[in-house]
C-alpha cells in the first residue's frame, strides 16, 4: 500500500527555551569580571556593599557587587536557582555546605562535622553551584575592597537567610525580590 499523498505534517516540538546551566553562568561571570571598564564603573563605599544589576545570559539575574573590607552576606541559599560568581578584584572567601538540605519543613537542624567547605577566590577565580546551595561569602581582608560578579538562573524567586551557631543552622528569614531591589 502506498503512502497517502496528503499525509499530515509531522508534529513539531514546541521551540524549547535553552536552559541556562551553571557553567553558562560561570562563563558569563568570568567574562564580565575580566572587563576592567565595567568593573571600574561600580561605585565603591567604604561603609557598605554596593551593587549594579546586570543583564545575565538567557534572562538570568546578574549583579556586580562591591565588598568593603570585613563585609559578608551571612548564611543563605538561593532556593531553586543555580548560580555562579567570579571575583574581579581583591579576594573573597566562600564558606559552603557540601550537602543538599531539604528546602521546606524545617526551622533548625544540626549539621554533621564533615559538610563544611571553604574556598578562597582571588581575582579571576570563580565557582558555579546548583540548586539549594547554602553558603556565605565574605571579604576577610582588613584593607582591600573586593568586587565580584554574580549570576543566577532562574532569576532568584527568594533567598532563605540562616543563622549559624556551631553545627546548628536556623532559618531566620525568607527574602523576596522586593526586599533587595
Ligand atoms: Fe549567595
Image (tube, grey):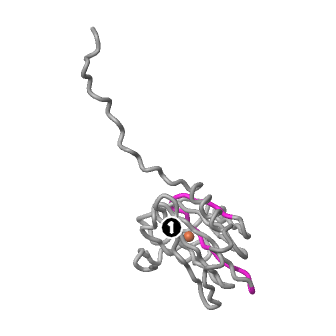
- The residue under label 1 is 55
| Quadrant including the N terminus | top left
Q: Residues within 10 Å of mark 1 (few under 14, many from 20)?
A: few
Residue shown at 49% from the left, 71% from the top = 108
Q: Secondary structure at mark 1?
A: strand
Q: Is residue 24 left or right of residue 158?
A: right
| Residue 174 is inside the magenta segment | no
- Name the residue nearer the viewer: 140 or 91: 91
| Residue 136 is inside the magenta segment | yes
35, above or below 15, in the image: below
- Magenta part of the protein: which range? 126-143
Decide if ligand 1 comes within 8 Å of the CB at mark 1: no
Which image quadrant for residue 157? bottom left
Tell me if I can see residue 102 in this picture.
no
Count of numbered circles in the view: 1
Residue shown at 62% from the left, 75% from the top = 166
Extreme residue in the bottom direction:
47
Horizontal and vertical percent for residue 71?
A: 63, 83
48, above or below 150, in the image: below
| Quadrant including the C terminus | bottom left
Q: Is residue 174 left or right of residue 149?
A: left
Amino acid at each position: 500500500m502506498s503512502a497517502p499523498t496528503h499525509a499530515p505534517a509531522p508534529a513539531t516540538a514546541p521551540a524549547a527555551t535553552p536552559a541556562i546551566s551553571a557553567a553558562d553562568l560561570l562563563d558569563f561571570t568570568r567574562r564580565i569580571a575580566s572587563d576592567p571598564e565595567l568593573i571600574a564603573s561600580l561605585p565603591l563605599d567604604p561603609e557598605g556593599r554596593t551593587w549594579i544589576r546586570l543583564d545575565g545570559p538567557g534572562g538570568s539575574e546578574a549583579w556586580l557587587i562591591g565588598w568593603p573590607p570585613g563585609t559578608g552576606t551571612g548564611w543563605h541559599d538561593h532556593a531553586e536557582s543555580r548560580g555562579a560568581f567570579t571575583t574581579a578584584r581583591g579576594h573573597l572567601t566562600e564558606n559552603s555546605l557540601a550537602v543538599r538540605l531539604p528546602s521546606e519543613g524545617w526551622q533548625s537542624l544540626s549539621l554533621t562535622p564533615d559538610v563544611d567547605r571553604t574556598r578562597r577566590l582571588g581575582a579571576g577565580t570563580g565557582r558555579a553551584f546548583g540548586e539549594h546551595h547554602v553558603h556565605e561569602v565574605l571579604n576577610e581582608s582588613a584593607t582591600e575592597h573586593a568586587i565580584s560578579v554574580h549570576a543566577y538562573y532562574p532569576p532568584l524567586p527568594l533567598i532563605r537567610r540562616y543563622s549559624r551557631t556551631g553545627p546548628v543552622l536556623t532559618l531566620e528569614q525568607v527574602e523576596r525580590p522586593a526586599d533587595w531591589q
